Amino acid sequence: MQTLIKNIKELVQVETGRQKLRTQGQEMAQMETIKDAYLLVEDGKIKAFGQMCEWNEKSEKWKVEKEVDATGRLVFPTFCDSHTHLVYANSREHEFVDKIRGLSYEEIAKRGGGILNSAKATAAASEEELYDMAWQRLEGVMRLGTGAIEIKSGYGLSTESELKLLRVIRRLKENSPLTIKSNFLGAHGIPMEYRGHQEDYVDLVINEMIPRVADEGLADFIDVFCDQGFFTVDDTARILEAGIKHGMRPKIHANEMAISGGVQVGVKYNAISVDHLEQMGDAEIECLKGTDTMPTILPGCAFFLNLPLSPARGMIEAGLPVAMASDYNPGTSPSGNMQLVLSMACIRYRLTPEEALNATTLNTAYAMGVSGELGTIAVGKRANFYITKPIPSYEYMPYAYGENNVDRIFLNGVEI
């Protein structure tokens, strides 16, 4: 089936030459658009695009079955959100109030809150309940323009609960039109019963959880929270080595609370991304140069916890790529709104609109291993895009923070 989107005011983030898997350094400020454009979709893929005058000359060769008039509207590739914890059982607004009253994230965690709070609720919830709640959240982020998403486990912290979370993610993969990648994050927190001897919990993750996750084929990635008060560099190395042996590529939570060595261990084990990075020094930036690892910033977490801002401008000026994702989770970033992340990228991190769009589409697609098929408008890529409401320019998207300027969503070439 062929679908034509015609009279597009501006078609944003097109690739007319050689397709790139990611963009970095000064390249991040470059973005190609076409004004007064058309976009042709066939069998779920992008078949052709260009100016309307070109379409009028060759329209007879195509067999269009559906036309959509986008007069006054822009078309963008859908967002790719490469870091979420979207499957969870309970909200944590009481801890939100504790933070307002002055308690730190670490203090809340030490008394059994935070991740442990969510783990307790997850253990009590059924797989069906978790699925229903997660499905509603997926529907919500999709309506805001997200077309691909990575979802982590990590609120289980026991073998059976972690497997339950990953099975929910598998069901979401099977039933949702979104592109979904799964991430095993058994090393997200240290259960209370393992405090003081966390090496025993690391052994449990390595010797019991990872083999069972692998046997069921439940995870694309393996992740560790390598940070102050959580898992050490040695713990992280052991877990990543075990995950790699079972076919899972590493990702890392690093440097949220302190410079932890997480960036370096992530690079050592060829992590596809190192995420958070609120605490970064020259050594971390230097370590990332020339690697295949994508530095991924989570603006929602820094905003919600009042953390220092990751030095996005410094990383770009050093020639690095930068991705930005939502960190959607109940404790530290209870929003999966990638339009808001786009705005934060410009407002708080001083990225240009072009850099911010690259950070939330192509580079986040790379950070979840799908930039060969998503993240830009390119012939042969999957037809995941959204049509805006009538807006004046692509710069309006980050400018108008708090508005939902997405009007119509197409995933795999089908309007949702």
Image: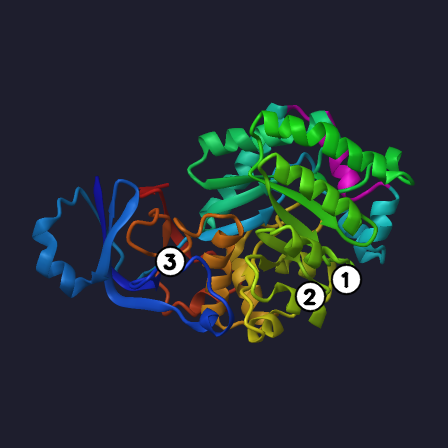
Q: Which mark is residue 259?
A: 1
Give the crowd class for mark 2: few <14, some 14-19, many >=20 residues within 10 Å: some
Image color mode? rainbow
Q: Are marks 2 and 1 in contact (CB under 8 Å)?
A: yes
In the image, is residue 95 above or below residue 177?
A: below
Residue 53 in sight here: yes
Q: Give the main secondary structure, helix, strand or loop, of the magenta stretch.
A: helix
The residue sitting at 58% across, 41% down in the picture is 151
N-terminal of the pair, mark 2 or mark 1, is 1
Compute the Cα span from label 2 to label 3.
33 Å
What's the amino acid at mark 3?
Phe
Which residue bears the numbered disc 3?
Answer: 76
N-terminal of the pair, mark 2 or mark 3, is 3
Q: Are marks 3 and 1 in contact (CB under 8 Å)?
A: no
Compute the Cα span from label 2 to label 1.
9 Å
Please state which of residues 39 and 276 is positioned toward the viewer in this rendering.
276
Q: Which residues are magenta?
A: 112-126
Which residue bears the numbered disc 2?
Answer: 284
Give the crowd class for mark 3: few <14, some 14-19, many >=20 residues within 10 Å: many
